Image (spheres, coloured by chain):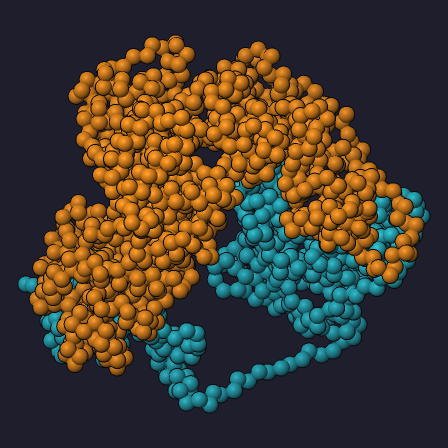
Chain colours: A cyan, B orange
Amino acid sequence: MLWLCLRCTDLALATAGAADPKRPQVVAEGQRVYCPDQAAADRGVAAGMVLANARALCPELVVLPRAPVREHAILEALAHACHHLTPKVTLCPPAALLLEISGSLKLFGGLAALLTAVRDTLRLQQVQAAIGAAPTPAAAQLLSHGDADPLDYLDAHSGALTRPRAFTRRLHALPLTALDCAPELVEKLARTGLRRVGEVLQLPGSALGRRYGRDFVHYLERIRGQRPDPRTTMPLASSFSRRLEFGAAIERAEMLLFPARRLLHELSGYLCARQMHCGRLNWTLYQEHGAPLTLPLRLARPRGDLAHLLELTRLGFATLRLEGAVAALALASDELHPAQSTSGDLLSTLVPQPDPAGIQTLCDRLTARLGPAAIARLKVQNEHLPERASVALPPTASVAGAVTSPPSAPRPAWLVQPPAPISVQGGKLYWDGPLTLLRGPERIESDWWRTPARRDYYLARHGDGRRCWLYRERRTGAWFVHGLFG
Amino acid sequence: MYAELHCISNFTFLRGASHPEELVQRAAELGYAAIAITDECSLTGVVRAHGAAREHGIPLIVGSEFRLREGVHLVLLAPDRAAYGDLASLISRGRRRSPKGTYDLGLDDLEPYSGRCLALWRPTDDSTADLTVGRALLALFADRLWLGVTHCLDGTEPISRAAHCDIAARLGIPLMACGEVHMHVAQRKPLQDVLTAIRLNTQVESLGRRLAANAEHHLRPLARLRELYPPALLAATLAIAARCRFSLAELRYEYPGEVVPPGIGPAAHLAALVAEGATQRWPDGVPAAVAAMLERELAIIHELGYEHYFLTVHDIVAFARGRAILCQGRGSAANSAVCYCLFITEVSPTRVNLLFERFISKERNEPPDIDVDFEHERREEVIQYIYRKYGRERAALVASLTTYRLRSAVRDVGKALGLEPLLMDRLAQSLTGWDRHADLEPHLRAQLGDDPRIPWLARLASEIRGFPRHLSQHVGGFVISRGPITQLVPVENAAMPERTIIQWDKDDIEALGLLKIDVLALGMLSAIRKCLDSLRDLGSAVTRLQDIPEDDPATYDMLCRGDSVGVFQVESRAQMSMLPRLRPRCYYDLVIQVAIVRPGPIQGDMVHPYLRRREGSEPVTYPDAAIQAVLERTLGVPIFQEQVIKLAMVAAGFSGGEADQLRRAMASWGKNGNLAAFERKLIDGMSARGYGTDFAQRLFEQMKGFSGYGFPESHSASFALLVYVSAWLKCHHPAAFYCALLNSQPMGFYSPSQLVQDARRHAIEVRPVDIAHSVWDHGLEPGTNGAPALRLGLRLVRGLHRSAAIRLVQSRGERPFVDVEDLAHRAGLDRGQLAALAEADALRAFSAHRHQAHWNLFAIEARRPLLDAATGTEDQIQLPAPTRGQDLLADYRGTGLSLGPHPMALLRGHPAFRTCARQQELIALRNGRFLRIAGLVTGRQRPGTASGVIFLTLEDETGNTNVIVWKDVQERCRPALLGGRLLLVKGVLEHRHSVCHVIAGELLDHSPLLATLALKSRDFH
């Protein structure tokens, strides 16, 4: 058995993207720095520092909240991509993967070549990771905390442990913090003056067990390979769907090929692990402005190789006409076929069921006859200004959510929007006929923080008998009709 | 023709958008017949309103608004003193049963308090419910109930008015008009919206209809009201106002009666106590001058009726003395001969007699002011005594008002306007110490960019500054009354359990002429008492304050050297460098020393003239005899607050009343601009009398400096006594002194580590914490060289509980511990406690070193008794001993200090520090010399009075060095300055008056070297 541990060193920053590449940035957890980028670290910002102090050191600092969910997504994406290398991939959250590679050595032509493939995968997935290699998974995890080159102690071809003393020396030199145990236990070990993994490994197990517990001794035995350490390989989803957010939006279609290649690489890793081919690629381009663009690409026959999928995508993207910059790219593939088997496409037709509810049918008919703009559903909004106090929704829209009661003052059902100017002649109001004020004013003053509105509303009777809702703009003294009572 | 009877101020926190003073002034300007301030279940704002009402000549009506459990909205007004008592009691009832800041009242609570108050009822829109409520209220208030109608153009009036008329007619309740006012002018609407957003913890934009629809809830002109309300409704307000004759000026504070025994008058009782005290003070007969002084003081006290006040303070002090709690009075009345005879102060009138102004003066119309400091660890006993003696109904703490300051204002307003919270945090950081309010908007623009909300942020943040946020408890001001205190002022809960506060702060108390007694906590008194106790144990002749000899030259010599770590008041960096310049030689010099390193004299630029005159390098002159009388004791330079006020009278022609206003304005400067009003008057008055404008200007600057930190001579005199006492103890009984200081932590300026280092520099043998010798407190043991040695106590062990330590000491008393298991078993210590002892290196009796101690005790935790015999051989394992560096770091972790070598001593050999000087070598170096010095940063200070400079304290193995860092170096070396724990400073040495400073030119951060101490391989020695 030969295990590789890939421990990601910049996951938190990778989730953040580059908001402003010129400014130093940190990922923060609560009020503390979780991970500074290089520029911030150069200014003296360190992990664990209180944010206020970090800002004092570096006033232009960009602070981004930590996003554990997205960190996990990146780790999973890397795990999928690693299926190129071996089907035995184990997730070790929050930041590591374990690969059992003894079965892949022949395929790749030896350990050295396989390690090169690992580094290529990391580069393509744009993740920085430290690599530890050892005959046991626990030792591989430990060694991923150091900077030892696996080829210093493993045979470059067979991967066999040919220089065991070099291996032990490197393992023993690691600090206690590299141990995969609770911080309290590490602290307790440090209290007795122990500083290196080797110092712990040299103490008798019974003495350690009495002080630090049986579990800890078992862990040490797993490191040495004296106790079995089975690991659960990662299960694979039944279909593939990934979305990649860009730190900075991409403006040109050909530039999209780089992230597309990353997604396809991941897809082909997934297909390889499941021994499947895919019959269709569904690309979705999320534009900064405008609706998402979808690009379904059908394959003549199911394939799984990266080069072919990439070429097809390149051709497909060339046909696209972008309306603006693209902020994210998604790839989904749900048409999977066992590799080397051919099968016909499934044809499925979805026929919408007619809505039995009468109102719905009526709305549909009205809409069909009068056009979609002619029919709407009014919803009361919790706002003072009449033009914002209700919204017109499509008749089919759901009105779920908090129900807002209308204001207790009288309100017309028909809003004249925009408000119609009223002319004033000889002190009398005219709007397609004379208007007589009946009641008022109701004073509404709002929105001082953007476009101030200061209005006095009145109920009035039109010459033709209609009741109108007028207001006088207090700043200018101008009059407007804003509504008609039914 | 109209009186506003429903009006809330900003003391209805986060609802009202105007100060009570603004509301009152506006009502007067509009010609209202009267105004009521009716904050929700609170009378906190009424004293301010009362002051403004007197100033603007408009009757103030005291009232309060309530929202009852049943949803009833009600305003109660106090027509007379008795009704006022009902109102205050009702508020207290609602507040006392509810957590801090809230209240809880229902209709059924009103009954006992409803017999005299007038009630304005604000019905809802639900007429069925209204009828029920109306009947209930009618039963309670009968002909003292009105139905309040508000017309605020919300569009519902025609309908709601009809409904209200209907209810009124059906129940026979008269209607009246009221504005439900929230602000004094309509322009406060944006602020009111922001307050709503802050209250509901959201943004203005997302409030929607939870904001008021318009700005009509302000004080509107009479003409406008006439358009909106029928005349009868307006006339009703006048009728109600006319029934409200109560004024806060009627409140008479009545002292608790029990301080005077039955059958004797208060004056006679006080005189008897004073006479008795005088014979104790002067067993050989009271000096004639003192006797005359006593007679005069008693006469003034009698004339002003202050006997009960002195008797109450005496009672509290007598309790403390009975419990051997050290205390010391200070304040304008505290240093009187009467107080000396009542043992309220130890400052003898024979000692200071002619130097002081008279302490109580009827012309000055100041209430007597006695603050009493108690040992900080035992003040609670005194507070509990007060509660026990007078009961919670009659004694409560004065409130302290927390108001919006610029930083909190910007943060809260910014959030309400929807600005990014992270941005707001950064902005608030940048506003630390910001005082140029005029430049606020450009500053905000520079920080936030061109956001359209910035002008609003600037304007609203300025408006909200000074708005009250909540009430908390004053540090120790008690109001004690004869009857229930809730008849005088409402009482509510403080955050601390079992503490109640009144709804007024100290300014309110003072404005109404009520008396408070300050029961304060002072750490130094604890230390002095502990020191005297241990002197008694050592068999010293000095066991009481009175035993300490006066005018001891050795003590003053020590102070003149600036050797003052641990000494009360003069141990700070600034004081320490002032001591060798001022060279105090007598008690009164100490009075000046305490007062001179303060914002007042520094901002008034009075320090250097005083020092020059004292050195004799400038002649002592006086413009005239009147000024000479005021300034003679301070060589013609005003140092004390009293002198500045007196000068305003003597040199600028202020009347007694004006001087009194000036004193108040000085106390509240920064909260309002009252002081600025006196600037012109002072300068004009002084130039009219022939004094230079420059002198007048500096005097005014000094007034500004005094404000907020007002430091009067009367306080300084009491403090100086404790300065002398603590200095004498340090000089003559250093081991006992340091021991007492360490046992009174936290207090003072220095950490235990710094105190222990200072003790060792004074050749005191300090012995480590050890479970075989230490008790909880630090103690004295016979030393090797005859002088007592200081044994560190278990209290220093971080993470060790006091109860565990006491068990340990008890079981050790039965027989010594034989091993860790014996210790753990007999003292009942758990793993955490044992680990704490091991980390403090207190287990050296059982283990060769810390590592082994931890190793051994980890083993016993898990061991079960039955398996005891089976202790294997693996326990023979010898772990590597810690290096000195590791020990040092663990010492700090375990106890906060180390008796081992100083980190700098261990690191001295490192190439980085090879050319660095040690602190003790500085004195021999030439002034102005370039040098390097390195040490641990133990202090960073940016004094408000020094322009932008930062003082760093660097500690090395020989002592502390002051480093002065100017702006340009701060900018250049910011990371090192802010983050460095171990710094190397390149700079220039400055000597003056045997004090050394280093003016920093560059700071280099070598903190990572501290971590290397933990490594085995590197030990630079």
* Left or right of residue A411: residue B802: right
Measuring from the top left, give residue A347's x and y in whole percent: 64, 81
Looking at the image, residue A430 lies above or below residue B932: below
Q: Which residue lies at the image location 83% right of the left edge and 60% below the top edge?
A: B864
Q: Which residue shows up at 24% across the image and 59% down it?
A: B84
Most foreground residue, A480 or B660 = B660
Q: Quadrant of the C terminus of chain B?
A: top right
Front position in the image: A443 or B847: B847
Q: Is residue B966 visible?
A: no
The image quarter in which residue B41 lies:
bottom left
Q: Position of residue B402 (x, y in %)?
A: 38, 48
What residue is at 70 percent from the left and 63 percent from the top?
A: A267
Q: In this image, A342 relative to A27: left or right?
A: right
Q: Which quadrant of the rendered structure holds the N terminus of chain B?
A: bottom left
Residue at 80% x, 72% y is A340
Q: Look at the picture and state if B26 lies above or below B304.
A: below
